[in-house]
Image (cartoon, coloured by chain):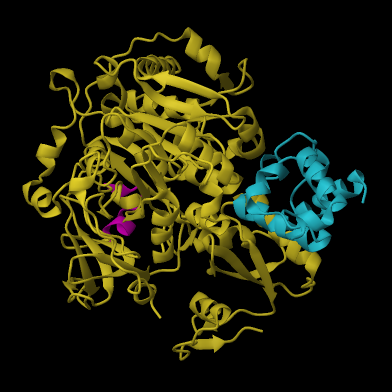
Amino acid sequence: MRASDNAARYATIHKDPASFAVPPNLADYRAVCAAFNWEAARKGLSGLPQGRGLNIAYEAVDRHAYGPRADRTALRWIGKTGERRDYSYRELVLATNRLANALQTMGVKSGDNVFVLLGRVPELYVAVLGALKMKCVVTPLFSAFGPEPIATRMKIGDARVLVTTETLYRRKVEALRGSLPKLHCVILVDADQDGEGTRSWRKLMQAASDAFEIPPTDSQETALLHFTSGTTGRPKGVVHVHEAVVTHYATGLYALDLHDDDRFWCTADPGWVTGTSYGVIAPLTHGVTNIVVEAEFDAPTWYGVLAQERVTVWYTAPTAIRMMMKLGADALKDYDLSALRFAASVGEPLNAEAVVWGAEAFGLPFHDNWWQTETGGIMIANFASMDIKPGSMGRPLPGIEAGIVRRKADGGVETVNTDQEGELALKSGWPSMMRGYLHEEARYRKCFAGEWYLTGDLARCDDDGYFWFVGRADDVIKSSGHLIGPFEVESALMEHPAVAEVAVIGKPDPIAGEIVKAFVALKLGFPADEAMRKELLGHARKRLGAAVAPKEIELRANLPKTRSGKIMRRLLKARELGLPEGDLSTLESDER
Amino acid sequence: MTDAEIRALILELIGEIAPEADLALARDQDDLREVFDLDSMDFANLVVAIHDRLGVNIPEAHYNQLFTLECAIAYLHDALTQPKQNDG
């Protein structure tokens, strides 16, 4: 049974936009799509003064800081212990100016790559936006990554600056610094003094001027470098340019329905693309108040934030929603959630049950939407004004043409009929489309067939133009909304002296979507016992971090391989799931 | 069960989930998730393991009462001395 067949059992949720207290920005889908073009969408932004170009940080901060929103809270930070810190747009402009000046003082040039490895602390936001002002290329990295994913990405991304904390630096980076010759300076946000090879954020900021003029910025200059994973090979550095901010703004307007007085909360970590595009950039370009919560998910904390902060628009993820469902709607009864107007979800397809549960528990359904690191912003969405078919990802954003295609033998593609499964594809040309995989031109070119960008997701489109996710075309793993490449996990395990072969699969999990599971065959002479299993688990976690490392390891004498020696992940997965094994004609040696 | 035994058990179970963890680093007031790099799934697995070993039912709404060793010991201590109320 397909997930979408299951979803068809859920009735369409009808909307009556005329009854909304706040009229939606996209009231009539067809009319807005028909009138939309990207040039006009850009008019919602300011552009640098005197026609000096387009810079993300200017649109997010400066243009509000010198206008009527100057004293509005741009960021409300809620720390782990419940402490709060507010930054007005005026304060944010001064802080980001200081950081831009500090970088300049240290000899950092525009175009240099700045990596930010931090939890959700205020300095993260200042670092990202300040570096963008300096026209550096910014990569926020997930702070739960272990040393290897961090080092791999810093090497691919030619990291020149790292902004992190003392603890993260000592634990995850210091030992590998020798392998990062391009790394010019490390700034520690919690250090009072400069150290050996490190600088104190506080000292740098104190010494820096709070006046800074953003240099002329071509909208096609690189701004952000996000990492994503494929089935094989190293992580891919996805290049985005300053023009992406046009998509961030337009999707904030239509897909998230942001209004001027909103209090917006995106729960994603900026170490993943959602947390940057929608946890930093999109809300600030709209001049709203952006709520930042440092704590990881736990229901009482989150419900408390929704109620106390009077959150109006909430962008969260399926894993968290499923955890809340497990807890039950009853847990919400002591919280006043009357301010909440719109709730959206992204990261992996949101099951129909969860969409409907939102309506029960929060009084409004979750609006699923779809996009990926390469697209830079939301591409397909359930809009506030539009009926929801639970389980569907919705319809393409204004300015986005989506299709379902099949690859042909000649390398081209053809579109398939309504309700037929195929690969989800997007017509190239929107502002936040990736401009390349860094240093990997061939891999980048493989993503395109003519004018279509091929997403690697299998989907179908129904008669009403709603898109339904079917599966992935490759073996990447989605765990708690995070994309994990099997190759990266396999490589780390292969480094262990006892390991002969590894295959990593995504094993379905009711909460996380999938968990990472590794099958390992040991070299002769190593005992396949519990102590070895734990040793390998610890080995993988130490290198990869908890977010990427396998949750399960199974030891085998041999893994199933094709004649050419390729391990058949597909077969391992089918067996793990109890599914038909499919075509075994290429199987040469089976598992034991 | 003494508090010291509860403490030792929690650390033993963390060692199962995160074998790389240096359990000697554990200080009673630290957030276990940070010190031992436990993500939300690891933490949920820890709670399940505690349940399996002690028979204490820990509803998800109480997870945040187990984030530090100090709190977790107090929580489990109470639960074990009033088993009927907590194991429903």
Residue A510 image-quadrant placement = bottom right
Q: Is residue A424 magenta?
A: no
Which tint was used for chain A?
yellow
Q: Give the percent coordinates (x, y) of residue A329.
A: 51, 54
Q: Give the percent coordinates (x, y) of residue A101.
A: 39, 15
The span picked out in magenta is A435-446
Q: Which chain is cyan?
A: B
State whether residue A144 appears in this view.
Answer: no
Seen at 39% across and 73% down, the residue is A3
Seen at 27% across and 76% down, the residue is A421
Identity of the residue furthest to the bottom in this view: A585
Seen at 47% across and 41% down, the residue is A269
Identity of the residue furthest to the right in this view: B2
Q: Give the percent coordinates (x, y) of residue A152.
A: 51, 47
Residue B36 image-quadrant placement = top right
Left or right: A14, with A290 as reference point = left
Q: Nearer the viewer, residue A237 or A369?
A: A369
Q: Quadrant of the C terminus of chain B?
A: bottom right
Picture layout, residue A548 above or below residue A413: above
